Amino acid sequence: MSEMLIASFAVAAALALVGVVVFVSARRLRRADARAALALHESEAQLAAVVESAMDAIITVDSEHRIVLFNRAAEQVFRCRREEALGGSLERFLPVRFRAAHRGYIERFGHTGVTSRRMGDTTTLAAIRADGSEEFPIEASISQTEVDAKRYYTVILRDITARKQAEDLLRRQQHELRELSAQVLEAREEEKTLIARELHDELGQLLTAMKMDLSWLRERLPGLDPALEAKARQMNQVLDQTVGSVRRIAADLRPLMLDDLGLADAAGWLVEDFARRSGIECRIDLPPAERIDALERDRAIAVYRVLQEALTNIARHSGAKRAWAVLEAGDEALVLEVEDDGRGISAEDIAKSRSLGIKGMRERMLYLGGELEVMRAPRGGTRVRARVPLVSTQAANGRRA
């Protein structure tokens, strides 16, 4: 009997111990659950605070495009209270012309499996205020997540009206400055043309007349004193040099053959004259003259001036022994490349504020819808590459129309 009693006490003690363990474990679990619930609550509160304090508008929608999250910044951007936005459609804040495309974009994005991406990769998106009174530009990114088998999309967006206005203003100012620069360059070309013609026609004729008069005097002075004869020869040589200088200056200002014979002959003459005067071996490859002689006047002048400036820089700065120039005429554009085997140009030289020659060449090309690159050549020198459309953008658009 005593043994049975002892066994009963042992079983009761074991059950009590188990009960205590279960009770303690239950209390610990309840405490852990409470701590987990508290931590979850704190985390959610922190997340909500972050969302609310964000400078960008944050909107979350479900798979039916109904708004389930609308932060304070979104209220300010769209001028809409949160209570009015929640449960409504996101399309309310999109211009009508974009709504179908936006819905299709969201659906395609949902099938990609990508968690986030920028919306409008290269274009500025548009949105409207809640009352439909104003359309404004935005930048946006989108992300997706799945909770309890339900898909949600979160859009983070920013109103970039001020930045867009600043960009548009800067673009207009740049266009105006480019127009002004083009007018200045055109006025300079006109002035150079006028001066070159006056030098060539008027001063050249006067110098020629003086040379003829000097020859007439020498022939009619009998028994000319040797000293006077030497002086007359010296005067004749000075006149020849002066005539040559006038022709060179006139050609530098404005080669008349550019107007009379076309770009091909003018470019060929310029390269030959450069090689003769600088001592640098130089050649140019030209397309058939008929391919480029019909080029518009302003484009022919721009290409000629780029070639002239590039050769001048080679003579002044490169220390080169040889130079090459290639002029190619494609179906839509004319391409000029000038290269030398000199010391080469550095990035610092290109960026110098006083590199007005390079800046002038680039402005000429940009105004005509072309481009200009200055870089180190593979053989170590400098390469200048200019590309200009054969016709203006306006003319090309009119022809396509």
Image (tube, rainbow, N blue to C red):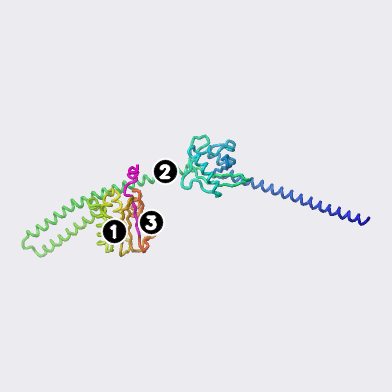
Q: Are marks 2 and 3 in contact (CB under 8 Å)?
A: no
Instruction: Write down the residue under mark 3.
Output: 352
Q: Is residue 364 visible?
A: no
Give x and y (percent) for residue 259: 24, 50
> The magenta stretch spans which residues?
383-401
Q: Looking at numbered disc 1 in the image, what kind of residue is underneath it?
A: Asp
Q: Earlier in the sequence, mark 2 or mark 1?
A: 2
Q: Nearer the viewer, residue 309 or 394?
A: 394
Q: CA distance from mark 1 to mark 3?
A: 31 Å
Crowding near pointer 1: few (<14 within 10 Å), some, many (20+)?
A: some
> Farthest residue toward the right?
1
Which one is in front in this view, the residue at disc 2 or the one at disc 1?
Answer: 1
Instruction: Write down the residue under mark 1.
Output: 285
The C terminus, quarter of image: top left
Give x and y (percent) for residue 110: 55, 46
> In the image, 245: left or right of 103?
left
Q: Are marks 2 and 1 in contact (CB under 8 Å)?
A: no
- Mark number displayed over residue 118: none
Give the answer, above or below, for where 125 lies relative to 196. above
Q: Nearer the viewer, residue 205 or 63?
A: 63
Q: Looking at numbered disc 2 in the image, what kind of residue is underneath it?
A: Leu
Q: Looking at numbered disc 3 in the image, what kind of residue is underneath it?
A: Lys
The N terminus, quarter of image: bottom right
Give x and y (percent) for residue 392: 33, 46
Crowding near pointer 3: few (<14 within 10 Å), some, many (20+)?
A: few
Residue placed at 72% from the left, 50% from the top? 32
What secondary structure is marked by label 3?
loop
Give x and y (percent) for residue 158: 51, 44
